[in-house]
Image (cartoon, rainbow, N blue to C red):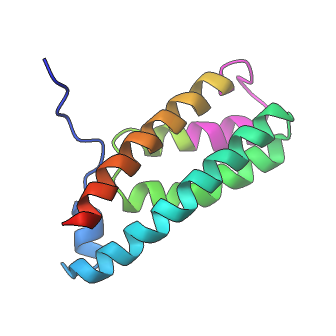
Amino acid sequence: MEETQKITDLSFLTNFAAGDTARMKKYIGMFLQIAPQQMEKIKAALAASDWDAVRANAHSLKPQITYMGINGGDVLIKKIEDDAAARANLAELPGIVSRMDDLCGKAITELELFMKQ
């Protein structure tokens, strides 16, 4: 059976952009450009055990995750930010970052399809 559950829910963005598709696509375009860079920064900081950089990059990605309505992404990115800030659950962090990266990848695929409409 094929997995058809969407990762993204654009209702927040639709509301935020007042239904203006051009404006929505502008924000989605920004996300498509910034999210992969932010995830790379998070992964690099994680590899270097630079918890302040992990926290800062997760923090800057957080609003974008919310705007794109990435299902479960808000919880994961907040956990990455909070755990890095508190230097807590550090052994779990690579797995959580990996799940967030995977989620972002799936969301990017969905959003790229939306951009083609």
- Magenta-colored stretch includes residue 87: yes
Rendered position, 101 above or below 39: above
| Residue farthest along the front direction in this orientation | 116
Q: Quadrant of residue 20?
A: bottom left
Task: Report x, y in % for residue 34.
Answer: 57, 62
The reply, left or right, for residue 5 in relation to residue 73 is: left
Say which residue appears at 67% left-offset and 46% top-offset: 40
| Residue farthest along the left direction in this orientation | 1
Rendered position, 80 above or below 15: above
Say which residue appears at 82% left-offset and 47% top-offset: 52
The reply, left or right, for residue 102 in relation to residue 112 is: right
Say which residue appears at 58% left-offset and 36% top-offset: 79
Name the quadrant of the C terminus. bottom left
The residue segment tinted magenta is: 78-93
Task: Report x, y in % for residue 43.
Answer: 70, 38
- Magenta-colored stretch includes residue 50: no
Instruction: Tell how many labels.
Output: 0
Q: Quadrant of residue 113?
A: bottom left
Task: Report x, y in % for residue 1.
Answer: 13, 17
Name the dominant secondary structure of the magenta segment. Answer: helix
The reply, left or right, for residue 107 in relation to residue 2 is: right
Q: Nearer the viewer, residue 27 or 11?
A: 27
Task: Report x, y in % for residue 38.
Answer: 63, 54
